Amino acid sequence: MEVCQGSVLNSDLSENVAYNNPVFPAYIKRGQLSNYPDFRAVSHWHDDLEFILILEGQMSYDVNGQKLSLQAGEGIFVNSRCFHYGYSDAHNECIFICILLSPLLLSANPYFVENCLNPLIQNMHFPYQKLVPAIQWQNAILRDLEVLYENNIDEIQPFIILEKAVHIFRLLSENMDFFPDYDKNAEDILTLTAMIGYVQKNYPNKILLKDISAAGCCCKTKCTLLFQKYLNASPMLYLNRYRLEKSTFLLRNTAMSITEIAYACGFSNTSYFCELFRKYYDMAPGKWGRMV
């Protein structure tokens, strides 16, 4: 669920994941929903397979416009290159583990990639899988996620990650659900991918609705409809949320002033940035920087 704050985009406009160890493609972190503006992560996508395990509270989750509810003890798998984000409309806190495992972890052998890995990660009819403890194979994945987190809190343990990645990928491959009509929205997803990529690449600059729609080669009306359908937000609201989330990284990790951060994240003035920040985080930007 993490939007990788402080990172850059890949050439295909997917999110470049900020792994725990930059040279080993696995991301394992504990998170909380209140760290996101309006208790809503910004929708994003990447090549990595993503897993969420709910530790406390509950979370709504959206994958390519499909909405699910996750309770404590449950989780979700999100397949490669699917839009996803978690949120709470009621602004309820949720503590969770977020794990991203790159296909590159298991891509050394061409035969394995072609016959075992690609049928999973390139299956557009298997965008996600809710994971519940009552189903044995899903519970096994949930337990693997716990082990991955507990053993990689302080330092990445490559053997444990590879061992659990193989087990998890095998269980998913053997139990893939089939969403028969899921490819009918493929054109919409491609258009939205282009528009979101444009926002994420150009957010420090002035962006208008016409710029976003042009990136998707569609009219402003269709642009707005697609954002609302799949992201439950207008294009400009998505842009502001993305800018705010980028600002939290700078507040946490740099000595930049509030004004410098506001302009670096694309806001036209400091007052508007502070107003939006207070609205979505219920505190001033300066206080966030001291607390987190």
Image (cartoon, rainbow, N blue to C red):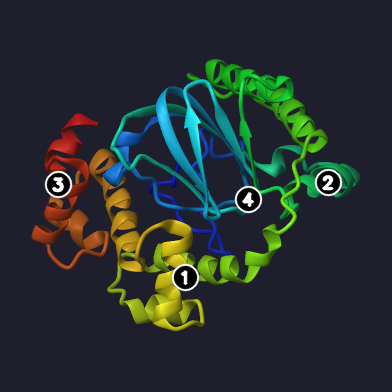
Q: Give the residue at mark 4.
A: 47
Residue at 44% over, 74% down: 223
Task: Kindly identify the amino acid type of the residue bearing the numbered disc 3.
Answer: Arg
Task: Kindly identify the amino acid type of the residue bearing the numbered disc 1.
Answer: Met
Q: Secondary structure at mark 4?
A: loop
Q: Position of residue 83 (x, y in %)?
A: 54, 54
Q: Secondary structure at mark 2?
A: helix
Q: Quadrant of residue 151?
A: top right
Residue at 38% over, 49% down: 6
Horizontal arrangement in the rendering, residue 289 relative to residue 191 (left or right): left
Horizontal arrangement in the rendering, residue 204 relative to residue 172 (left or right): left
Res 195 label:
1
Res 113 label:
2
Q: Secondary structure at mark 3?
A: helix
Res 158 label:
none
Q: Secondary structure at mark 1?
A: helix
